[in-house]
Amino acid sequence: MLNMIFLFIGTTEIIVIAAIVLLIFGGKKLPELMRGLGKGVKEFKEGVKDVKEEITEEAPARPSKEDASKPKDQEKAPKNE
C-alpha cells in the first residue's frame, strides 16, 4: 500500500518537498544532512552485500545438470585415452 503512494509523486511535488526541507533546515545544514544520508545508504548497501556473500559461501554447491545426469559409476571410473 505504501509503495503505491510513491508511484504517484510527480516533479512538482518533489520540488515542493525540497523547498519545505530547505526552509526548515536552511542552506548550511542541508549538505550535512545529505552527507549523513549518503553515508547511511552506503553502509546499508555494504551490509546487504556482506549478507549475500555469507549466504553464498554457506550454501552447498549444487551439481550441474551434466553432473546430475551422469551415473555415479561413470564419475568415478578413470577415462581411457
Image: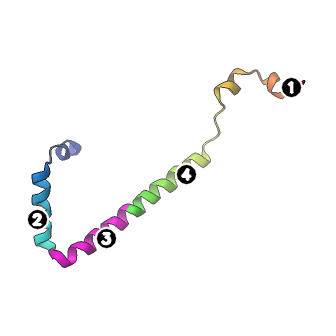
> Looking at the image, do the residues carrying marks 2 and 4 touch, with CB atoms under 8 Å apart?
no
C-alpha gap between disc 2 and disc 1: 73 Å
Give SS at disc 4: helix
> Looking at the image, do the residues carrying marks 4 and 3 touch, with CB atoms under 8 Å apart?
no
Which residue is found at the position 17% from the left and 75% from the top? 27
Residue at the spot of label 1: 77
C-alpha gap between disc 4 and disc 3: 27 Å
Q: Residues within 10 Å of mark 2 (few under 14, many from 20)?
A: few
Q: How crowded is mark 4: few (under 14 residues within 10 Å), some or many (20 or more)?
A: few
Give SS at disc 2: helix
Q: Which amino acid does label 3 sit on?
A: Arg
C-alpha gap between disc 4 and disc 1: 35 Å
Q: Residues within 10 Å of mark 1 (few under 14, many from 20)?
A: few
Check residue 31 for magenta coloring: yes
Residue at the spot of label 3: 35
Which residue is found at the position 9% from the left and 53% from the top? 12
Which mark sits nearer the N-terminus, 1 or 3? 3
Q: Horizontal placement of 75 versus 38: left or right? A: right
Residue at the spot of label 4: 53
Which mark sits nearer the N-terminus, 2 or 3? 2
Q: What residue type is labelled 4?
A: Glu
C-alpha gap between disc 2 and disc 3: 18 Å
Image quadrant assignment for residue 29: bottom left
C-alpha gap between disc 1 and disc 3: 61 Å
Front tag of 2 and 1: 2
Residue at the spot of label 2: 19
* Residue stretch rendered in magenta on the structure: 26-41
Front tag of 1 and 3: 3
Front tag of 4 and 3: 3
Give SS at disc 3: helix
